[in-house]
Image (cartoon, rainbow, N blue to C red):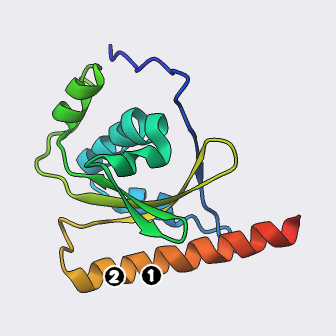
């Protein structure tokens, strides 16, 4: 049985960005990952990002990209993330190795992290690809902000 981290006062609520057409880029990114990387990402999101929000940018886990866009960097294996979080590695966790994932997010409202999208930098390490992913995340965020203003 896996111990779950205690939900302390620093926890942030996670939301997934949905486009006007109902598409969720973050969900599509997660679905594209192999089972091990999905498990690693879920553990990192739950034990790091959901607890620290944009404060991850003061650590090796995050980077401010400007104009309200942030990058969450996952580059540790599942066992390491679980050990640092003080939780057990799930007994049914798939086997895997090195991980290098990026998740783009924004912060809005009271302690809400909006998950925008991501990519597997380990599989696509080129700087050109990274810039393309950042530009797509910026466009998604800008569109989301425009739609949110229109609803008010």
Question: In the drawing, does residue 56 fall left or right of residue 152?
Answer: left
Q: In front here: 2 or 150? A: 150
Q: Which residue is at 70% across, 49% downward?
A: 109
Q: Is residue 20 something one can see in this rendering?
A: no
Contact (CB < 8 A) between labels 1 and 2? yes
SS state under label 2: helix
Classed neighbour count for the residue bearing mark 2: other residues with Cα under 10 Å, few (<14), some (14–19), many (≥20): few
Q: Which residue is at 36% across, 62% downward?
A: 32
Q: What x and y, as percent, mark residue 152?
A: 89, 64
Q: Is residue 31 something one can see in this rendering?
A: yes
Q: What mark, if any, has residue 29 been given in the picture?
A: none
Q: In front here: 78 or 57? A: 57
Q: What mark, if any, has residue 135 been given in the picture?
A: 1
Q: What x and y, as percent, mark residue 39?
A: 31, 41
Q: Which residue is at 30% across, 77% downward?
A: 130
SS state under label 1: helix
Q: What mark, if any, has residue 131 been given in the picture?
A: 2
Q: What x and y, as percent, mark residue 22?
A: 67, 67
């Amino acid at each position: 049985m896996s111990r779950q981290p205690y939900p302390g006062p620093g926890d942030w609520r996670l939301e997934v960005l949905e486009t006007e057409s109902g598409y969720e880029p973050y969900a599509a990114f997660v679905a594209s990952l192999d089972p091990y990387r999905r498990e690693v990402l879920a553990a990192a999101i739950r034990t790091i990002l959901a607890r620290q929000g944009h404060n991850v940018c003061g650590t090796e886990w995050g980077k401010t990209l400007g104009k309200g866009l942030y990058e969450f960097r996952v580059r540790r294996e599942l066992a390491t993330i679980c050990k640092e979080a003080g939780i057990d590695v799930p007994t049914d966790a798939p086997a895997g190795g090195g991980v290098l994932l990026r998740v783009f997010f924004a912060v809005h409202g009271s302690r809400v992290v909006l998950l925008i999208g991501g990519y597997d930098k380990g599989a696509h390490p080129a700087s050109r690809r990274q810039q393309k992913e950042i530009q797509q995340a910026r466009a998604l965020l800008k569109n989301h902000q425009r739609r949110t203003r229109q609803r008010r």
